[in-house]
Image: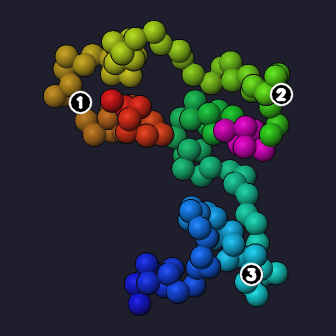
Amino acid sequence: MNHSVLRKLLSPVVTRGTRADEINASLKRSNLLPYVNKLELKNNMRVSLYSRENNIYSKMLLKVGNGELTESDGMINLENLCVLIDNIQELVNNVYPDIDNISCKTISWFKERAILSPTNEQVD
C-alpha cells in the first residue's frame, strides 16, 4: 500500500486543513498518544562537522528556537548573525569571490557557498 492511500485511510477529515492539521487531529484521537515522545534538537551534527562560523550559526539558531535570545517589541536581535548587503552584485562578490575564474572551481568550493532561501520566489 503506498503512502498516499495509507494517509487517506488513517487521516481524519479536516476541512481546509493542512497536513499539520491532519496529523494534529489524528494524534489527538490516537491510542498511541501516550507513547509519543517529543524530541528537541540539541546539537546540529552536520553543522558542527564544518567550520567554526557554521558552529556559531548553528548555536544561534538553537537559541532562537529555544527562546533564549532577548526580545524587544517582539523582535529578536540577531546583530552578529549575517552580513547585510545593499544589492545583488555585492551578494555575488561576497559569496563568489573571483567569479571570473568560476570554471576552474572545485565542487567543494561551490558547496561552501550555497545561498539558501525559503522559497524559489525569493531567489527570483
Q: Position of residue 83 (x, y in %)?
A: 54, 17
Q: Is 120 colored magenta in this rendering?
A: no
The magenta region covers 61-66
Question: In the image as oriented, which residue stretches furthest toward the bottom?
Answer: 1
Query: From what the image shows, is residue 29 above or below residue 109?
Result: below
Residue pictured at 38% horizontal, 22% vertical: 95
Q: Is 65 colored magenta in this rendering?
A: yes
Looking at this view, is 32 or 52 the one in front?
32
Looking at this view, is 85 or 22 the one in front?
22
Colouring scheme applied when the structure was drawn: rainbow
Identity, as a three-letter code, of the amino acid under mark 3:
Arg
Query: In this rendering, does residue 36 appear at all?
Result: no
Badge 2 vs badge 3, beta-carbon distance below 8 Å: no
Secondary structure of the residue carrying tag 3 is helix
Q: Position of residue 29 (x, y in %)?
A: 74, 81
Task: Give the mark toward the camera: 1 or 3.
Answer: 3
Identity, as a three-letter code, of the amino acid under mark 1:
Lys
Badge 1 vs badge 3, beta-carbon distance below 8 Å: no
Nearer-N-terminus badge (2/3): 3
Looking at this view, is 37 or 16 the one in front?
16
Identity, as a three-letter code, of the amino acid under mark 2:
Thr
Looking at this view, is 115 or 10 the one in front?
10
* Disc assigned to residue 29: 3
Task: Give the mark toward the camera: 2 or 3.
Answer: 3
